[in-house]
Image: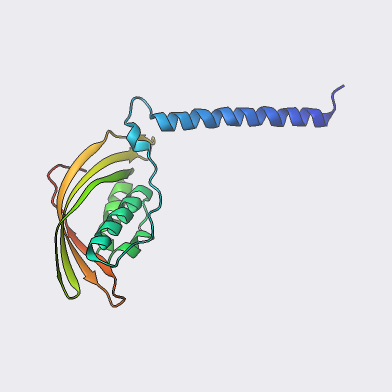
């Protein structure tokens, strides 16, 4: 007769093997995409480095990294450190719209060129040329749309606060190709 301890150990081993196979199937599915969907969409956005706000250009760069992270996670709490409080409601509103539509975005900055920077005391105007790729994820079935490419000619108003750091105050977005 087999003792209960041997049966318990054998069942534990079988359960671990089944869990391992399920983990392998799920991760293979996610890294390969499903139904021929764009594999680039499956990239996970990592938490950006702390915002670098010592110049208007670095402020814009940090802002873009942090809003990308906020659009992906659906949360602006950490991203708020990279922008002026005046800009935050615009980002929150867009995330609310995405949430209402059951979407998240995985956006990747491909090109960031600083066209011009004009600074006067505590305010700077930064003009950029930006190229982005976007993938929208449907939160209901966790599927990704195909990659959308977009080009922008944006103008950022960046302000220097009393702490001598620069924060994005507002953005005039001009796109030559559309996104949602």
> In this view of the protein, which residue sits in the foreground, 59 or 105?
59
The quarter holding residue 67 reads bottom left
Residue occupying image coordinates x 49% and y 31%: 26
Residue occupying image coordinates x 38% and y 61%: 50
- The spot of residue 66 in percent (x, y) is 33, 56
Q: Quadrant of the C terminus?
A: top left
- The spot of residue 141 in percent (x, y) is 39, 35
Residue 47 located left or right of residue 163: right
Furthest residue in direction bottom, as rendered: 162
Residue occupying image coordinates x 28% and y 78%: 162
Residue 103 located left or right of residue 130: right
- The spot of residue 94 in percent (x, y) is 27, 53
The quarter holding residue 9 reads top right
> In this view of the protein, which residue sits in the foreground, 83 or 11?
83
> In this view of the protein, which residue sits in the foreground, 35 or 155?
155
The quarter holding residue 140 reads top left
Q: Quadrant of the N terminus?
A: top right
- The spot of residue 139 in percent (x, y) is 37, 40
The total of numbered circles placed on residues is: 0
- Rendered image coloring scheme: rainbow
Measured along the vertical axis of the image, is residue 133 above or below residue 82? above
Furthest residue in direction top, as rendered: 1
Measured along the vertical axis of the image, is residue 47 above or below residue 3? below
Residue occupying image coordinates x 50% and y 27%: 25
């Amino acid at each position: 007769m087999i003792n209960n301890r041997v049966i318990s150990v054998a069942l534990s081993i079988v359960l671990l093997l089944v869990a391992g196979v399920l983990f392998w199937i799920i991760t293979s599915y996610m890294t390969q995409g499903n139904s021929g969907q764009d594999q680039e969409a499956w990239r996970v956005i990592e938490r950006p480095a702390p915002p670098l706000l010592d110049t208007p250009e670095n402020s814009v760069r940090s802002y873009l990294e942090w809003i990308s992270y906020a659009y992906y996670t659906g949360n602006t709490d950490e991203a708020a450190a990279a922008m002026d409080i005046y800009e935050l409601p615009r980002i929150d509103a867009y995330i609310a719209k995405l949430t209402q539509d059951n979407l998240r975005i995985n956006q990747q900055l491909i090109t960031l060129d600083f066209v011009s920077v004009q600074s006067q005391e505590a305010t700077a105007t930064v003009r950029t040329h930006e190229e982005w790729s976007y993938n929208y994820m449907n939160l209901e079935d966790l599927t990704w749309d195909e990659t959308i490419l977009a080009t922008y000619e944006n103008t950022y108003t960046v302000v220097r606060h009393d702490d001598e750091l620069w924060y994005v105050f507002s953005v005039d977005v001009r796109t030559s190709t559309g996104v949602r």
